[in-house]
Amino acid sequence: MTPDRWQVVKGMLCAALEQDPQHRERWLQRACAGDETLQREVHSLIAAHDGPADFLDAPVVEHASLALPATDWTGRIVGRYRILDEIGRGGMSAVFRAARLEEQFEHEVAIKLLHRSHDPAGLMRRFRAERQILARLSHPNIAHLLDGASTEDGVPYLIMEYVRGEPIDAYCERRRLGLAARLRLFRTLCDAVHHVHRHLMVHGDIKCSNVLVNEDGIVKLLDFGIARLLDPEHGSACHAHTCTIALTPESASPEQIRGEPLTTASDIYSLGILLHRLLTGQPAYEPDSDAYYELTRHICEQPPRRPSLALEETTAPYSSAQLRGDLDNIVLKALHKDPERRYGSVELLSQDIAWHLGGFPIAAAPESRRYRLQKFVGRNRALVAVGMLFGLSLVIGIVATSWQAHVADRERQRAQRHFDDVRGLAQTFMLDVHDSITSLPGTLPVRGKIIGHSLRYLDELARERADDPEVRRDLARAYERIGDLQGDVMATNLGNNESALVSLRRSRDMREALWSQGVRDDALLRERLLIELKLAQYSQANRSIGDALRYADAAADLAHTLTQRPHVTTEDIRLGANALVVRGTIQAMNGALDAGLEEMDRGIRIFEQQIGAGNSQINIRRGLANALCRRGDLLAKVGGRYEPAYPVHLRSFELFEALIQEYPLDVHLRHEAALVLMDLGDIAARTGRTQEGLLRRSDAVERLRALSGSEPLREELRFTLGWALGELAASVQEQGQHVQAARYLDEAQSLLGSLSGAAATRLNTTQFLMAINDLKLGKLRMAQADAVQASRDRQETLWSEAHALVQRSTQVFNVAKDDAVLAAEAVEHLRTAEAALHACNESLRRLRRV
């Protein structure tokens, strides 16, 4: 048998073993297409495979699909779940939908059960490999692994997130999605695959049926059954070759067909096949028959069909001309036979699509001046049109009136295209690019530039089209994001919030005007609710409690309207719960503690009901964690109820920790968790858990150091670290570590003194916190002066330093006692400071009399 013939036989064997045994013979007859010799050879290998377990030691048997007749699992109990029905089956495993047994916690999962095998050791190796791969991946567009074990009779299983969706190609076709929408979905998939590659893995079986999209348009990548870990030095899959792995021939790369090692280039090829199917609804190859070796010959030897040509055979909602050029080149580059000539990474493939959507030259296009000129003209139609008109005026002069009308109409069309392109570009950068990097570390300067450029574009468009509601809506979104960048919920400098409030009010006024003019869709209602919530929180931080209550009441009214509408969404429910939590917080801080806590509890119950119903979205769990954190703060800091506050804060922290495990790069999550951890340490110390309090505060400070180091331009992170260091200093001083406490306080004052709020003319939280630390340092100097065994001059120096520090803090507390938010705490600190000041004066008088 020749090597080429052997490759065909091996490929046919892998594909045959993947089929259901009951239908395998019929499939084999069709696939061999009359080649009786091939059929006999494959039959003999299947018989050997189904024989004794040690009959063959070749890799084909070790790695091939090891299926036996299926077991009926419906209704059986696996772990804590009851199997409901089967949702998929392959040669190695079957996948079932299952529900949790406890009635009070309704939650559906997908359970993958491996078939019984003649080679249990080999099967367990594949099972453990898939579990290891899934456990290492945490990405919103990859189905999560929840658990894994074996049944009582030894059948291995995996418990995974249940995705209620449909294959990505069916999703696009059923909704008749346009070209841009399909490309955006594909870019989301690319991000998930890029995450897999960053973790030194390849998927190996990317196809439409392994990429599901739910009703909310969220993409989920499934089935890592043949994924492999990469060799970090060479970028190829370790321990396995694709000739021995069950694969899907239609989406397999030439090197997979030939049995070469898997690399990231193989996944890029499969993505190219999937993109071809999304764009055209047609396969990339047209073999002369259904025979397996005919298909593999086309994959390895024949060029794929250009998407623009394949589209001519369909009734897609866009034309083949829209695929001609850039998209043809992108797909064909991804499908190149030579892996070295494909895209170097999934990120580059996704970037080329982004450039195409933005009207910029792509890397896959042939380098030529003509091509770049065409792209320049596409992005600057109005400028080119002016140049053409100027040239025409020199050559033709005055033309007939009918011709002038024709030219004017054409210019209006070009101006409209230019208008649409500029608006689309601004939206892409503001919504897609900016919003996707908001939670990443170190992106604050980039976000500012993106929003600034987008705002300039939109301001220009608003001047051109003052009556266009969509432009005004885009402009309102831009001003909202400007407010987010300017704002300072920590209120480290109230001037920051004043700027943010101006931007947010402008955004709110624009949306109110649109609503009053008849634009009344659910999306605008949600945007109005969100802006009212932000205005309430920034007003509260800015000491404007009356304004904060007014905005919070408006938000609650809008939330009630939104949640009473038909087709209410999970996001609507989350916003409604959050509105209750925000209003309850502001009520409690305004003196109505019990009424505020009751309002907050209504919101908390809504979050818990959603989670109990199986909604595990990050926004729902994050909303509950934040609501519990606020409730614990109010119990402890406003009500002085530290013991009941402890379990509330503990639960909030546990929720944040679970979210960080899933989303480790989310800066906001890590910051929120560190804040809760600090509060938990304070409450633990106040309830007699002294050592726990110290450990939790030390942990929080280290987390905040890391965050502040990664985001040096974000004042609120430095402020939080300064606050945390002061709190930690108090804890270690209680343990008698005076020198360490002084170091922490000096570091805290240095951080806080570098903030814009330190030099502001109006009292703010930075100045108040520095006053608290001054008081702590003063009392520390007093303790050192009492304990020092030195000269009278040294004692006098320490008492003088303590006097100056406490005197400075007293001046701030005297101003803060009239502040709407800080008054209660300021009065308490002022009493302590005045007593300390009296002690300093007495000690200095005594020393100076000696």
Image: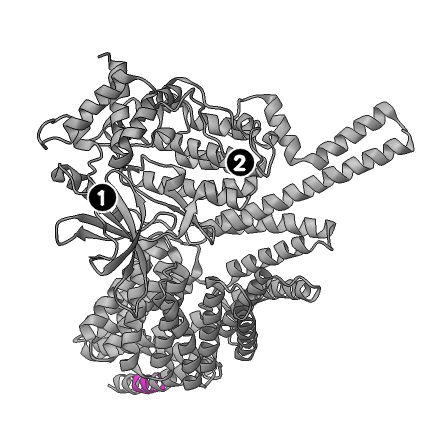
Q: What percent of the width, then of the height, locates residue 77?
A: 21, 58
Tell me which amino acid carries mark 2: Trp
Query: Crowding near pointer 1: few (<14 within 10 Å), some, many (20+)?
Result: some
What residue is rendered at 18% in x and 52% in y?
Answer: 149
Q: What percent of the width, then of the height, locates residue 531?
A: 55, 66
Mark 2: which secondary structure?
A: helix
Quadrant location of residue 624? bottom left
Tell me the quadrant of the picture where the C terminus can be found.
Answer: bottom left
Quadrant location of residue 772? bottom left
Left or right of 113 in this view: 383: right
Identify the mark at residue 158; answer none if there is no mark.
none
Label 2 belongs to which residue?
355
In this orientation, which residue lies closer to the viewer: 718 or 831?
A: 718
Name the front one of labels 1 and 2: 1
Label 1 belongs to which residue?
70
Q: What percent of the width, then of the height, locates residue 752?
A: 40, 65
- Is the magenta region chiefly helix, strand or loop? helix
Tell me the quadrant of the picture where the N terminus can be found.
Answer: top left
Is residue 835 on the magenta stretch? yes
Tell me which amino acid carries mark 1: Ala
The magenta-colored residue range is: 833-841
What residue is rendered at 42% in x and 18% in y?
Answer: 302
What residue is rendered at 39% in x and 43% in y?
Answer: 211
Q: Is residue 800 above or below residue 251?
A: below
In this orientation, which residue lies closer to the viewer: 53 or 195?
A: 53
Q: What percent of the width, then of the height, locates residue 793?
A: 25, 75
Q: Is residue 788 above or below residue 2?
A: below
Residue 246 seen in render: yes
Measured Cα–Cα span from mark 1 to mark 2: 48 Å
